Amino acid sequence: MWLYLLVFLATLLVDLVPFIGPPAWTVMVFFQIRYGLDIWMVLIIGVLGSTMGRYLLSLYMPRLSDRYIKQKKNEDLKYIGKQLSTKGWQIQLFVLIYTLTPMSSTPLFTAAGMARIKPIQILPAFFVGKFISDMLMVLTGDYIAQNSKSILEGLLTWQSFLAILPGIVIICAPLFIDWRMLLEKKKWKLNFRIWK
């Protein structure tokens, strides 16, 4: 039973960091294959740990933002967060669809935390999408383990680098777009002087 606790803690930790790291499903696949754990228990406990990690990330991200981002940009991010908070089901739908993609959810929660979007507005959709996408990955874990040599050879390809680009754009968009000007005056402006 303690191995399931390790699954929970490991998935929580990988989804707690504010930069792109290993996906939580890789932790689940490792524990499931290495220790022969029940695949459904690993999935449920792993997704719960992942959701808790993202929740905690969204709670401490405003503090990091306050510490390292200029006050004017923080006000801009808070403004966009308030605007998005009024879009209840639309934000849930976006998070659900985004979570179903193979892209990392780190940029999504980093941006949401900096914009001070309430975690309850995105966590239910995240949990559902995460459960579905991680289920596909964990259920194919045996295949991945049996073909690990050919998979490792394909990790460093131009396709894998292209897969990271949308995450970088999602992190940069909330930071460098002047949202107040865009939403209030309908003018597009980028501001790269946001750091203290």
Image: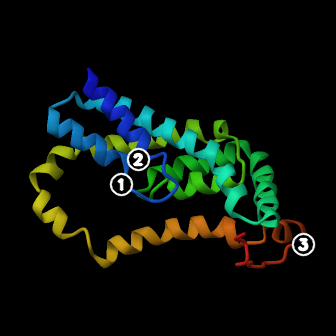
The spot of residue 65 in percent (x, y) is: 68, 57
Residue 175 tag number: none
Q: Are marks 2 and 1 in contact (CB under 8 Å)?
A: yes
Dot 3: element: helix
Return the residue nearer the eye: 194 or 135. 194
62 up-or-down from 171: above or below: above
Give the secondary structure at mark 1: loop
Disc 3 versus disc 2: distance between alpha carbons? 39 Å
Q: Nearer the viewer, residue 78 or 150?
A: 78
Question: Label 3, on which residue?
Answer: 185
Q: Residues within 10 Å of mark 2 (few under 14, many from 20)?
A: many
Looking at the image, is 178 positioned above or below residue 11? below
Residue type for callout 1: Pro
Residue at 18% from the left image edge and 64% from the top image edge: 152
Q: Is residue 157 above or below residue 40?
A: below
Q: Name the image quarter holding residue 177.
A: bottom right
Q: Amino acid at mark 2?
A: Val
Residue on which disc 2 sits: 14
The mark found on residue 22 in the picture is 1
Q: Label 2 to label 1, Cα distance in Å?
A: 7 Å
